Image (spheres, rainbow, N blue to C red):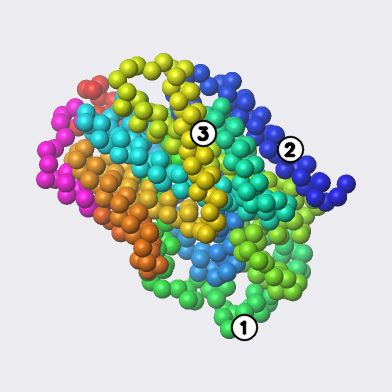
Amino acid sequence: MSDQTWTTIAIVAYLALMLGIGYAAFRRTNDLDDYMLGGRRLRPGVAALSAGASDMSGWLLMGLPGAIYVAGLVEAWIAIGLTIGAWLNWKFVAPRLRAYTEVSNNSITIPSFFENRLKDTSRLLRIAAGAIVLVFFTFYVSSGMVAGGTFFESSFGMSYLTGLLVVGGVTLAYTLFGGFLGATWTDVAQGILMLLALVAVPIVAVVDLGGWSVVRDGILAADTSAAADHLSFVAGASVTGVISALAWGLGYFGQPHIIVRFMAMRSPSDAKVGRRIGISWMIVTAVGAVMTGLIGVGYMNVNGLTLENPETVFLFLAQTLFHPVVAGLVLAAVLAAIMSTISSQLIVSSSALVEDLVKMTTKRELSMTTQVMLGRAGVLAVALIAGLIATDRTTTILDLVGFAWAGFGAAFGPIVLLSLYWRRLNRWGALAGMVGGAVVAFVWGQSFLTDMLYEIVPGFAVGLVAAVVVSLVTRPPGQDIEAEFEDARRLAVGAAPTGSV
């Protein structure tokens, strides 16, 4: 059999495995709580790998290595900022959010948590949050489909549209029926596959070239006019550029598809183990992605090769260095990164559509069967719109991810932190902060200003200030909110609730 046949067999086997896991999850999904949150029974290791895999997406194996390949280690500041942000997220948000969402009327989505936490009877807060989820996740899902189309185009010579349809179709299938458990279980398998691939590719590439000294010489010779750029963290960098890169870490506090994993853990105490597993996984994979891009520069130069699309450097090295079967499994890691994120985002989008918009605007009680059916319809609707956006290839994967990441970080990040740690926050402050942060991030990201400073910085700042100021000049929360805040705080540290709620 030809090399292409062996690689195709490996990819098809991987896709079949994902569908099988989705079917197994379907058999375990009985109601909306199962479909949206897995019944709050995730073990810390599962939660950690699932959060990591759904977080990183095609950006980790395509976007980041491509950026390093073009500009060098100066682009690694993004990975550093993300690692710091992820650690802070696990440390300060995970245990409190798990506790508070249980105490506050067993909230199963971020918008419903905001409403229950702040006792917003107007429903404005929940509807605004649900709308923000749908808008920004449509762009986020689209970025994954762009990565999928690029993957199949580069690896198999398929048309971009065909690749987009394959990735979107398989991911949609196991998410549509498996729900949260389907997305989570596949995330674990995909997270392990990503880890192995990002360790193997740079190591094998260095060995193949004859050692690090050969790689380094190749990097330095790649561009004699800026030879040191690839090996420097500061060459060509500006203060605002480094700030913008590190500011990616701010986004973690407001990413619904990541923090929903915290809500699904068995207990707040699981966050400690989850943090250790999750951050270890993230450090290894981020270093692997950075080294893949860097080593790719040396490899191309030493062998006299050129790469048309920098975001395919990982794909090229995998296909060049490994036996077709192994290469197929390594390439499946790219699909794993892409599909794990798409599935998680589709689930959160579906929950926003059904739990936070449809149920809020209908007066009749919906049966559990109807709610799950609507959830699946929501998955389908978001996937179709995102697919249409993905047919336009004028933007890169990193551009789409960065825009959506900033939108969520600015809109939800300040409100999540204040909800968990500031008693004085009220519904009007939360609404002002959420809308203000989202609008600033959206407008800034669509203007020339985004070239000077990443939109999450002004968006997060406006959202935080607006929430605090408006809360202070409007009516303070009632005693019931104060009592619930205290119960959540006690539960997060393992103490018994006061019983006052």
Task: Name the disc covering residue 13, or none.
Answer: 2
Please give the name of the residue rendered at 55% of the width and 64% of the height, measured from the top-left corner. Answer: 67
Is tag 1's residue or tag 2's residue first in the polypeptide sequence? 2
Left or right, 141 with respect to 337, comes to left
Q: Amino acid at mark 2?
A: Ala
Please tell me whether residue 18 belongs to the stretch shown in magenta: no
> Could one spot residue 197 in this view of the protein?
no
Residue found at the far bottom of this picture: 225
Residue 459, located in which quarter of the rendered image? Answer: bottom left
Please tell me whether residue 476 belongs to the stretch shown in magenta: yes
Gap between marks 1 and 3, in whole Å?
Answer: 50 Å
Q: Are marks 3 and 2 in contact (CB under 8 Å)?
A: no
Q: Amino acid at mark 1?
A: Thr
- For label 1, the residue is 224
- For label 3, the residue is 380
Is tag 1's residue or tag 3's residue first in the polypeptide sequence? 1
- Which residues fall within the magenta stretch? 463-481
